[in-house]
Image: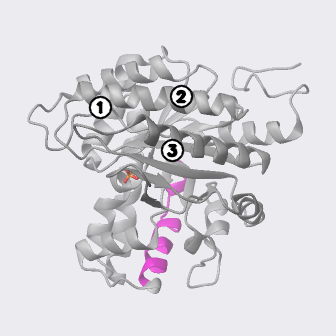
Amino acid sequence: METDENSHPLKGTSAPMETNELINTVTALFEGDKGLLAMDESTATCNKRFEEVGIPQTEEYRRKYRELIVTAPGLGKCISGAILYDETIYQSTKDGVLFTDKLKQAGIIPGIKVDEGTTDLAGFPGEKITRGLDGLKERLAKYYELGARFAKWRAVITINAVIPTKGCIEANMHALARYAALCQEAGIVPIVEPEVLMDGSHDLKRCFDVTANVQHILFDQLFDQNVNLQALILKPNMVLPGLSSPKQASIDKVAEATVTCLLQSVPAAVPGVAFLSGGQSAELATAHLNAMHVKYKGKLPWALTFSFARAIQQPALEIWKGEDENVEKAQQMLVHRASLDNAARRGEY
Ligand code: 13P
């Protein structure tokens, strides 16, 4: 078997066709210093972001905003994959070009959020479970036809003095593993996103312990559900003190805690990790990613990149404000933030 240093160990004659397709997608998503753009806010979340900056909350404004993103000049140099949402995967630019086609023309692989949001977990006050497994097999087949080659499912874990419970973590990680297995069967690379929220007054150590526990249970479940670890992407939170914790941590401490947690929990077979930003400022999320690369360059078994929503989009959204005359400046800011995240991936931010 011919190999070169860029080829994945599973790439070759012994792997089944569908595995090769998945590996090719993962390899393309982690190419160079690129990362992912999460532009998959649900209608409710997108409207919330619009409301905060005074943009009308209509389908047309949401479409215009996504058009601004997918047509941003130079975006394809920084971003390898963009995560869409059910509303946006069917939408087009004002000239009638599907967003998925615009992305592909820019060299960006379209992805799709397939979970259906969270709801209260029965029997576990204060905890959430993610919905969306019913009918997922059929939805994935449809999204594949529409051009999606990777998907996302987000599980939400909240920290306070008495939660998260084992019951909540297990139920959510089981759903993530079932989703991942269905994706791989459909030729779609699953991004598994177990997000431990930043809200709360807990310290860094508590976030570390909860995140490590969540990731251990996730990988047990992925193993039990026969998910191919070489054909998935982990999208974790960084290990941070709670937002209202009196004990905040330095950039280096966060980088060290995050990578140590991953080293203790994430098998080397996993090709890559793409962080969510979770409500950190754009600058801080980028600085944390950069510090991980400065400290651990060449020493980690998996690639580390970004899959930010707010940390790339928020500064651009605040410039756009829903006005046509601000589109160009907002696009420049979007690409600027993404290119700074590329620099962070090189440890040069
Ligand atoms: P943030 O980067 O804003 O946390 O969003 C990432 C994401 O995709 C959440 O599901």
Circle 2 crowding by C-alpha within 10 Å: few under 14, some 14–19, many from 20: some
Whole-number angstrom distance, CA of label 2 to CA of label 1: 22 Å
Q: Is residue 89 left or right of residue 33?
A: right
User: Nearer the N terminus, badge 2 or badge 3?
Assistant: 3
- For the N terminus, the image quarter is top right
Q: Mark 2 or mark 3: which is in front?
A: 3
Residue drawn where x is 56% and y is 74% of the image:
87
User: Nearer the N terminus, badge 2 or badge 1?
Assistant: 1
* Position of residue 228 measured from the top left corner of the image (x, y, whole percent): 72, 32
Please say if 192 is above or below 228: below
Whole-number angstrom distance, CA of label 2 to CA of label 3: 25 Å
Q: Mark 3 or mark 1: which is in front?
A: 3
Residue drawn where x is 33% and y is 64% of the image:
316
Residue named by callout 3: 172
Please say if 325 is above or below 275: below
* Position of residue 148 measured from the top left corner of the image (x, y, whole percent): 68, 58
Three-letter code for the amino acid on which mark 3 is drawn: Asn
* Image mark for residue 303: 2
Judged from this view, the residue extending furthest toward the left is 246
Residue named by callout 1: 207
* Position of residue 112 measured from the top left corner of the image (x, y, whole percent): 60, 59
Circle 3 crowding by C-alpha within 10 Å: few under 14, some 14–19, many from 20: many
